[in-house]
Image (cartoon, helix red, strand yellow):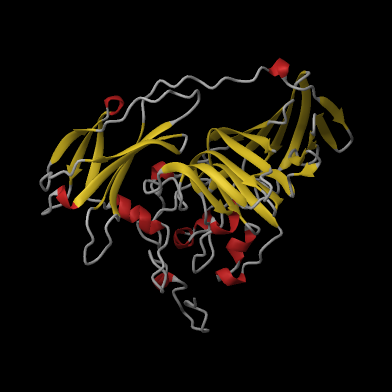
Amino acid sequence: WAYGGDFGDKPNDDNFCTNGLVFPDRKPHPGILEVKKVQQNVKVEAVDLAAGKVRVRNKYAFLDLSFLQGSWELAENGKIIQSGTIPRLRTPPGQAEEITIPLQTPQLVPGAEYFLTVSFALAQETSWAPSGLVMAWDQFKMPYQVPAAAEQKEADLPRLKLTESSEAFIIIGEDFSARIGKKSGALESLEYHGREMLSSPLVPNFWRPPTDNDRGNGEPKKMAVWREAGPKRSVQSVKAKQISPQRVELAAESSLPAGKSVFRNVFTIFGNGELVVTAEFRGSGELPDLPRFGMQMAIPGEFRKVSWFGRGPQENYQDRNTGAPVGLYSAMVDDLFFPYIEPQESGNRTEVRRVSFLNAQGQGILIQGLPLIDFSAWPFAMSELEWRKHPNEIQKSDNITVNIDYKQMGVGGDDSWGAWPHAEFMLPAGSYSYKFRLSPVR
């Protein structure tokens, strides 16, 4: 699509009149699902979840709820294990009533999460929509006392060998190896069964390609110090220690070209090939807020099949995720990116417990939040989203860019010509820490 400036017109408003909730051809943007969720006219509220008791509130001004068919699903780690329908309700406009959902407490799996989703859909076809169209839904995490997952005993794991060269620390295990560079302080190589999983190192990232709202409020200039904070970091130390025959720990500390900010990585490698990454940031109040705090790497393009347990299926951000239920989702990496008319930040998923990237043979890498991460993945470099003016100009890569984030600041939307995201969705330049685990999928 063409927009302001494409015709040599000056002055112009860039893409201002074509960046709403739908494309010019009426294809919806992901944000329209958030609007639908926020504006739904049926609200389900928890009363006693363990007993299946909820309150259904009718927010319609003139209709009772008899035109809707209710249903429910109980999911264990994203997989539906119980489901049913709700007897037709006749709740009057503006009123609420309590109902009991006949769910049974399942046999609790150690470490599992359980979510109840209650939905209301059109019971019959209308002049404007087919029967079965979901008009409202709400989701609740069940308050079950789930036992913790059993952890494998460290002493039972294969042994590790820690070696050192002038350039790197190398950890060698049974059918895997990892290399941490002394100059970069980064995970530069991760091999499983002789297959290299990284196309570029795992490095800190504090930047995101500006959104329309970011450009409108001047974020690219006001937060410019974070654009090169990761790439231009200065590694101060990289230390390695063999904690046990089955565990090695490496710590890398870097100063950032942003005031007195410090970034620290701790890599804990276990004999089974698992690698726990701890990322820590310490900033100062004199600095602008962060667009993002996370880590970025590239993996070979063969690992295009993506599955995740978190919010989805559409892209979502911390101030735009109530319309994205927690679930188990799958997509090809090319489909995670949304081609906005003017390229920008795209494809994030929040509150992710785990995400895997697999090839056609089912081999690949698993990333697990400890407990939660944001993730996104693009079949091109991040710079393509910042410097290209149209999505058809984006140059695809042989590799996949993977972002494993603590969080991004919100995307805002009160207006697109100066408003910032609300304060609770910003990332002040204070102190942050998060963890995630990398492990092979064989």
Tell me which residue sits at (59%, 54%) in the image: 333
Q: Position of residue 75 (x, y in %)?
A: 41, 36
Q: Position of residue 89 (x, y in %)?
A: 16, 43
Nearer to me, 170 or 344: 170
Tell me which residue sits at (62%, 42%) in the image: 259
The quadrant holding residue 343 is bottom right
Tell me which residue sits at (23%, 61%) in the image: 125
Compared to 322, does 398 lie above or below?
A: below
Q: Position of residue 85 (x, y in %)?
A: 27, 41
Residue 198 at least partly seen: yes
* Furthest residue toward bottom: 8
Nearer to me, 135 or 13: 135
Compared to 75, does 321 lie above or below?
A: below
Quadrant of image for the C terminus = top right
The quadrant holding residue 188 is top right
Tell me which residue sits at (42%, 62%) in the image: 29
Please indicate whether residue 100 sits to the left or right of residue 436 in the image: left
* Furthest residue toward right: 166
Compared to 73, does 9 lie above or below?
A: below
Compared to 244, does 249 lie above or below?
A: below
Please indicate whether residue 69 sits to the left or right of residue 343 in the image: left
Please indicate whether residue 365 sits to the left or right of residue 217 in the image: right
Q: Position of residue 269 (x, y in %)?
A: 72, 28
